[in-house]
Image (spheres, grey):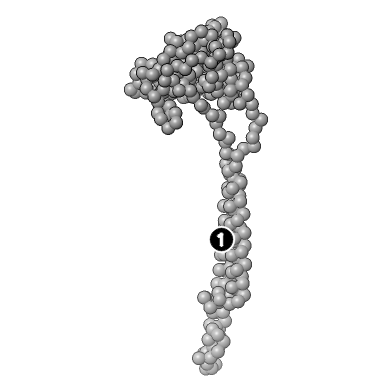
Amino acid sequence: MLRTALKPKWIAALVGALLVSWVFVALSQWQFSRSVSEAPPAVSTTEETRPLTGVLDPGQSFPATAADQMVTATGSFDASRQVLVRDRLQDGRKGWWVVSAFTVDGAPQIGGEGGTVIPVARGWIASPEQAGPPPSGAVRLTGRLLPSEAPKPVQDAFDGEVGALSVAQLINLWDVPSYPGFVTATETVAAADGHPLPAQGSLEPLSVAAQPVEQPVNWLNIFYAVEWVVFAGFALFLWWRLVRDDYERTQDALADARADAESEGSPQPTETGGTP
């Protein structure tokens, strides 16, 4: 069969099959590159600071459009309602977020009950002993609004420590109506004059960026990519099948010629067409 494959016409056919396969593989790679791509950038105003009361309503579900929105709110911290959220990273270091209840001025009442709060992550600490009380008085804070995390049970938690920033869990702990999300504070100033408040001990400011753009998978493109690979393999299989058919036809012709030669008693032909 090798002698058949080395015929000039089949060598030329092999070159053509390899060229076609290369084109199919290139098309497959292109389809794979198209299967995972960034979604078209949506019109977004998340980095434009907006009033919290105009973005989110307490007592309702957290809308997807409110996630990552920079917000501002005026109110006061409740020093009696504060927790530490464990296992928070800051520049590769593991520590705690200091989260305090912030009573929002002008927040809608829930069930006729006022004093609606929103949990505010005020900063990061490396040790629980570094946690201090929130600033007193009326303040205006700015930060990124995020949806509530799922509750996370902690077996060895100390008093005032939680495993996740779950609004539902904090509502049970604080026994106060709350917004369905929380804020990671980036700036806290005095509400009266806008002057920055003094640094609070070892509390390190947070820098929480917006979530990256999703990269949805287009399964149709993946199907096309696999299909092009199959076509590339089929091109080589077709070449091999044609060579095999030519070889088998040659062998059948030789067998017939030998049978005729044996019946006539003449010399038997060989594959090259000569006599032994």
Residue at 54 percent across and 6 percent down: it is: 113
Which residue has dot 1 on it? 233
Q: In this view, does 222 lie to the left or right of 99?
A: right
Whether residue 18 can be seen here:
yes
**Above or below: residue 1 compared with residue 265:** above
User: Which of 219/109 is in front?
Assistant: 109
Task: Residue 158: give x, y in percent of width and height.
Answer: 34, 18
Task: Residue 217: give x, y in percent of width and height.
Answer: 57, 41
Q: Looking at this view, name the residue that lies furthest to the right.
A: 43
Q: Is residue 52 left or right of residue 135?
A: right
Q: Looking at this view, name the residue that lies furthest to the left.
A: 156
User: Which of 133/196 is in front?
Assistant: 196
**Above or below: residue 243 compared with residue 97:** below
Tag count: 1
Three-letter amino acid code at the position of disc 1: Gly
Task: Residue 242: give x, y in percent of width and height.
Answer: 59, 70
Residue at 62 percent across and 62 percent down: it is: 20
Residue at 54 percent across and 19 percent down: it is: 187
